[in-house]
Amino acid sequence: MITLRKAVLDVSALFEETWTGIPNVVAAIAERALTDDGIDWIFTYETIPLPRDLVQRFLRLRSGAGGLPALSQLAWDRQPIPFDEAQAMVALFPNIKPVRGYFGTEAIIVHDLSPVTTPQFHNADNIFHFANRIREDIATSDHVFCVSKATMGDVHAYFEKPMEQMSVLRLGAEFDPAELSAGLLQVRQGARVEPYVAVIGTLEQRKNGGLIFDYLAQNPGFAHQYKMVFIGRDGWLDEKSRLMERLSKVGVPADRIQFTGFVSNTERTALLLNSAFCIYPSFFEGFGLPVLEAGALGKITVCSNSSSMPEVFPEQCVFFDPGEMYEFAQAMRIAELRAAQTRSRQQSLSDILERAAPHGWDACYAGVAQWVKQQ
């Protein structure tokens, strides 16, 4: 009788009600772990084992809504994994480590070190807290998965983790064929959609959205040709109002700039597909998943040439220095020309699925599974 390797996957991030970033990464790994009959996966909230049907419900709904009340009951009904049993297990923490040294072999996924590498975008308390937490998380991990070569280099440079104890775990992008079909139908009815450019990513200082407002202030005519649609959570608060007021003074009406806030995967896919092209002007990213998603959908992206971003989908990007307005303006002109050429060749559902196939999540999970089986 073959005894399967017991492995723990901390899925705490799935309890968030709206999924972006890390919850989506955890979901992609969990989906594949559920169907892997070569590893005995145990799903946990920290050290509390969770029923598989709860994890499956989260994945079906794409949300952790209602999970916390269930967790409260589970904390009463289920004991944490005993320490002596945990010492014989392998554990993967897809983000922070709620415990250290509890399991016999531990790995962590490091997504970025932005509070350390770009401290100008974070307050002192956050920098201090992050630096100390991530230092201990890395030091107590037998293996560190990094989402890009750039991030792996940062971990080695800042925390002196030996390179042989690390590997790149490239993130993926996948799309529901039904969602793609609906989005493509809208593209074919393009006469009803006013041309717009999609700005992807949470609105915050590190994402460099202010550069777009600077560009529009110098080139107000562009806003009359294209709407600017910011896709993502709103993190600017009062700063956004100040920037909008500045644009109104140069003749850019408020309705030429739209902010979607959080959107579902279906809405996001449709917005990207219908855009003329995309912009991702961030100063720093551990990976840059939106660039991968846009590229897989066949969209040209005006993209910063910093940190990990040149690794993601370079053939679909027009790169620029995020601190140089002249380079950004040049990239915008090139992207507009390339996007016009792309629109003249309508893509089919099979075109997108074929392009996206090499960039799915299977390779990411395979890296995790291989490491688990080697322990």
Image: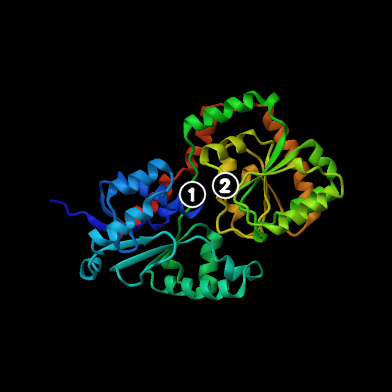
Q: Is residue 52 above or below residue 159?
A: above
The reply to whether residue 266 is in sight is yes
**Residue 41 pos. (x, y %):** 28, 53
* Side (left or right) of 228 relative to 151: right
**Residue 16 pos. (x, y %):** 45, 53
Q: Nearer the viewer, residue 251 or 286?
A: 251
Q: Residues within 10 Å of mark 1 (few under 14, many from 20)?
A: some
Q: Secondary structure at mark 1?
A: loop
Which residue is most to the left?
A: 1
Does label 2 or label 1 sit earlier along the sequence?
1
Quarter where residue 183 is shown: top right
**Residue topped by disc 2:** 262
Residue at image point 63% right, 56% down: 235
Callout 2 touching callout 1 (CB < 8 Å): yes
**Residue topped by disc 1:** 18
**Label 2 – label 1 distance at C-alpha:** 8 Å
Residue at image point 24% right, 70% down: 83
Q: Secondary structure at mark 2?
A: loop
Which residue is most to the right?
A: 250
